[in-house]
Amino acid sequence: DYGQLAWNTNWRVKIAKNQELNFVYQYLKQDEVDLYDQVTQRGYAISQTDPLKRQLAYLRWSADFSNSLFSKFIVTVFQQQFDEGRIRQKKNSPIVTSEFDKTVTRGFTAEVVSEISDRHEAGTGIDFYADQVNSNAFDKNIQSMELTAKRGLYPDNARMTSIAVYHRQSWTIKRWQLEGGIRANMYWLNMEEQQFGDVNLSPSAMVGNISA
């Protein structure tokens, strides 16, 4: 058995004749989710996820205009947070291991849609994401009540940032639809890791695609 609480909120309002705001919030939390495979097959007296929680909130602004090159604007800002705790204890062992991870993602996306004709549409946009992971763990001896800090599942305070710009085109020709686009991505990854060494990476890529 486990406990669960969840709800969704969706709020939409027109702020002008051609403009709209949409706010969404999603919440899900589960408590004391037992991992029976660990208990039955791997010798654990206790193995559960507690808690398991996800939260997502975003605000989207959209506007329509009677202009073929600037037909629609869409801007979205968001934040997502994912929390996961894990508790384990081996059979006949006084040591209870507790782990906790928190991942927060913040960002925004923006796109301009061009309805050039009934059969030709284009879109140009940018998106930005920033992730941060916090991870920690400790062992507790339930006989002596001694606590021992240890490395979490992931490098604590690891961060990744990405930014991308793109352009897409689509054409409708009779019963065919032709689509093409190009996207440039840049990433920055930073981790401070005593066990395996610090990591600082900044890859980039440019990709294109054509489909029909």
Image (spheres, grey):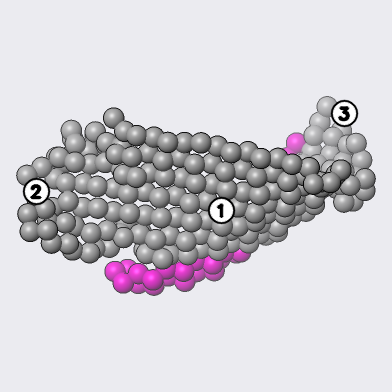
State the mark number for residue 174. Answer: 3
Residue in the image at 57% along x and 48% along y: 57
Per the image, the residue denoted by label 1 is 79
Question: Could you say where residue 81 lies in the image, as x and y percent from the top left?
Answer: 48, 51
Question: Could you say where residue 194 lies in the image, as x and y percent from the top left?
Answer: 31, 72
Judging from the image, what secondary structure is the residue with disc 3 in?
Answer: loop
Count of labels in the image: 3
State the mark number for residue 93. Answer: 2
Give the residues in magenta.
Answer: 186-212
The kind of residue on which mark 3 rests is Lys
Mark-to-mark CA distance, 1 and 2:
40 Å
The kind of residue on which mark 1 rests is Gln
Q: Is residue 163 left or right of residue 32?
A: right
Q: Decide: few, some or many residues near mark 3? Use Cα within 10 Å; few <14, some 14-19, many ≥20.
A: few
Q: Residue furthest top?
A: 175
Residue in the image at 22% along x and 38% along y: 38
Q: Decide: few, some or many residues near mark 2? Use Cα within 10 Å; few <14, some 14-19, many ≥20.
A: few
Q: Is residue 84 magenta?
A: no
Q: Decide: few, some or many residues near mark 1? Use Cα within 10 Å; few <14, some 14-19, many ≥20.
A: some
Residue in the image at 73% along x and 46% along y: 21
Please tell me whether mark 1 or mark 2 is closer to you in this view.
1
